[in-house]
Amino acid sequence: MTTGDDIAAMERLAIRSDQDVVRVRQLVRTLAVSVKLSLVDQTKLVTAASELARNTLVYGGGGTVDAGRVDNGRRSGIRIVFTDQGPGIADLDLALTDGYTTGGGLGLGLSGARRLVDEFDIDTVVGQGTTISVIKWCR
Amino acid sequence: MALSTDEAGRFAGLLESNGEALTSAWTDAVAGLLRGRLSHAELHRQIAELQKGFQSALSGGAADLEAEAAGELRALLSEVSSTRARQGFSATETAVSIFALKEAVLTVLDQDSATDAATLRDYVSFSSFIDRAGLFTFDSYVRAREELISDQAEQLLELSTPVVKLWEGVVAVPLVGTLDSARAQVVMERLLQTLVDTGSPYAIIDITGVPAVDTQVAQHILKTVVAARLMGADCIISGIRPQIAQTIVALGIEFGDIATKASLADALRHVLRQTDATAGRRGAGRRES
C-alpha cells in the first residue's frame, strides 16, 4: 500500500446486492468527477469499480467498499478499497489470468480491472477474505 | 398498555357525545398541518369516517389496535395512508393526521370543567391507543410506498427496453441506463420476439445510453448477439463512444467478428449498404440466368 499519501475522508458502502453495485458505480463516478479525472479515466475507474464490486458480491459473498480522494502532494486521485470476508483466492496468478473464471463470466474482471487503474494491490488469505485496493491518479 | 373495557367505553362515549365538536377540532388541526392540499370538505369527510371508525372499535371493546373489534378501524387507517402515499403526502403528515386526534380530545376535555386525576389517566391511555393507531398508519404508509416503488421499477423495466423498427428489415434496441441481468433478459426476449414478428434479418443494439460497459454488460450483449444469430439475424452494436472503446480494450473484451459502429446512423448505413449489395447480387444473378 502507498504510504505518505494524504487520504481524505473515505465514504463507505456495503455491497449486498446488485443494486449496491450500481450505487458503488454512482459514488465512484461522483468522486471521479470531483477530482476532475478525464472522461476516459472516469469511465475506466467506474468500470474497474464495477468489476471489483461485482467480484466482492459474487465471489466474496458481499462486503464493503471504501472510496475517497487521495493526494500525494503532486497530484490527486481516487482510492477505492474493496473488502470481503469470503473464501479468499487460492491461486492469485491463475485468478489474474485473462479468461480464467470459476463463475461463468468472461474471466476478465479481475485482470481487466488491474489494467484499468494505476495502482492495484491485492491482499488475500484463503478462508479469511480478500482486500483489493486501487488508485487512479489524475493525469 | 392495553385499554381496559371501562376505558374503551369511556373513550367511545367521549367520541360519541362530542362528535361534531371533535370532528371539527380534529379537521382544523389536520388542515393546519396539510396547508390546504386537501379541500376542507374532503378532509372533514375523511376525519368523520375515521372518528366513526375509532368510535365503533372502542364501543366494540377493542383493548388495542390488534383486537378483532378494531378490524374496521385498521382497514380505514390503511386506506387513508395508502391514499395519502399515492397523493404524495409525507409519512409524517400522514401519521400526524392521526396524532391530531389527541389535540382534539384535549380541546374537548378542556371545555369540561371537571378535570381530575381520573380524567388525566384516561387521557393518557387514550393517547397511547392513538399512538398505536398513528404508528400503524406509518407502517401502512411505508408499505404503500414500497408497492408504488416496485410498480414503478417494473414499469421502468418495460419502458426502458423498446425495440423499434428503423427500416424495412432493420430493428434497433436503444439501451439506456444500467444493463443488469434482469434487463438483459428482457432485452433479449423482446429482440428475439421482434425478429420473429417482423422477419427482420438485421438488428442494431445501440449502447449510447449505457454509462459503463463492464464484463457483465459485455457478456449480456454478446449472448444477445449470439442468440439473434442463431435465429438467422445479423447484429450490429452501435453507439460505442471513445471512452467506452478504450475501456473495452483495456478490459480485454473481444467482440470478435461482430460489427461495431460509433453511431446508430453509421450502423444503419452499414446495414443498408449490405442489403443493397445482396439486392445487387441477386439482381445480377437474375440477369445472368
Image: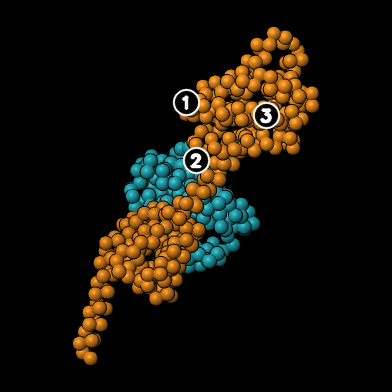
Chain colours: A cyan, B orange
How far is mark 1 from mark 3, CA to CA? 25 Å
Find the residue positioned furthest to the bottom.
Answer: B289
Q: Nearer the viewer, mark 1 or mark 2?
A: 1
What kind of element bears circle 2?
A: strand
Going 32% across and 57% down the picture, which residue do you hit? B241
Which numbered disc flags the more N-terminal residue, 1 or 3? 1
Chain under numbered label 3: B
Query: Which residue position holds label 2?
Result: A11
Q: Nearer the viewer, residue A77 or B22?
A: B22
Residue type at mark 2?
Answer: Glu
> Considering depth in this image, is B266 or B86 the residue closer to the camera?
B86
Q: Amino acid at mark 1?
A: Gly
Give the residue drawn at x 62%, y 57%. A87
Q: Are marks 2 and 3 in contact (CB under 8 Å)?
A: no
Q: Return the x and y of residue B40 as percentages of the image width and height.
A: 50, 25
Label 3: which secondary element:
helix
Q: Percent x, y for residue A104? A: 53, 66
Image quadrant assignment for residue B139:
top right
Q: Can the viewer see residue B249 in this picture?
A: no
Residue on which disc 1 sits: B36
Residues under labels 2 and 3: Cα distance? Answer: 48 Å
The tag on residue B54 is 3
* Residues indicated by labels 2 and 3 sit on the same polypeptide chain: no
Distance between mark 1 and mark 2 Cα atoms: 41 Å
* Residue B89 in view (yes/no): yes
Q: Nearer the viewer, residue B14 or A89?
A: B14
